[in-house]
Amino acid sequence: MATVEDVLLPDIGDFADVEIIEILVAPGDRIEPEQSLLTLESDKATMEIPSPLGGEVKTLEVAVGDRIAQGQLLMTVVADGGSAEGDSATSE
């Protein structure tokens, strides 16, 4: 059974109040675990934030230009129920 899960900004190290410079998914998009969701930029680094789960993006709670910190709600996802049936994971 699918459930709606909150996706929060994980611990990104010694950074706080970082700017979103790119959002790589939209509501309705199907995402896989570890897929990049958005790109953040601080004065020291640019980093992509991966998805902690697979499913379908339900809502985006942030926008390009927003400044965010650890634990902030990024989006909600209708998560896949348990097993990854037909999972065609690729390694890069």
Image (cartoon, rainbow, N blue to C red):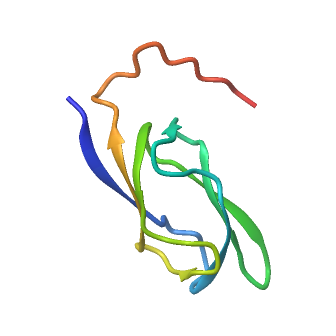
Between 76 and 26, which is closer to the camera in this rendering?
26
Q: Quadrant of residue 76?
A: bottom left
Q: Is residue 24 placed above or below 69 in the rendered structure? A: above
Q: Quadrant of the C terminus?
A: top right
Q: Which residue is at 24% across, 34% downward?
A: 2
Q: Position of residue 45 (x, y in %)?
A: 78, 74
Question: With 38 as the anchor, is 42 left or right in this view?
Answer: right
Q: Position of residue 73 (x, y in %)?
A: 39, 69
Give the residue furthest to the right.
Answer: 44
Q: Which residue is at 59% across, 23% downward?
A: 89
Give the residue furthest to the top.
Answer: 86
Q: Which residue is at 46% across, 13% downward?
A: 86
Q: Is residue 45 placed above or below 91 in the rendered structure? A: below
Question: With 28 as the anchor, is 25 left or right in this view?
Answer: right
Question: With 27 as the anchor, is 41 left or right in this view?
Answer: right
Q: Quadrant of residue 34?
A: top right
Q: Is residue 92 placed above or below 86 in the rendered structure? A: below
Q: Is residue 90 placed above or below 65 in the rendered structure? A: above
Q: Which residue is at 42% across, 40% downward?
A: 56
Q: Quadrant of the N terminus?
A: top left
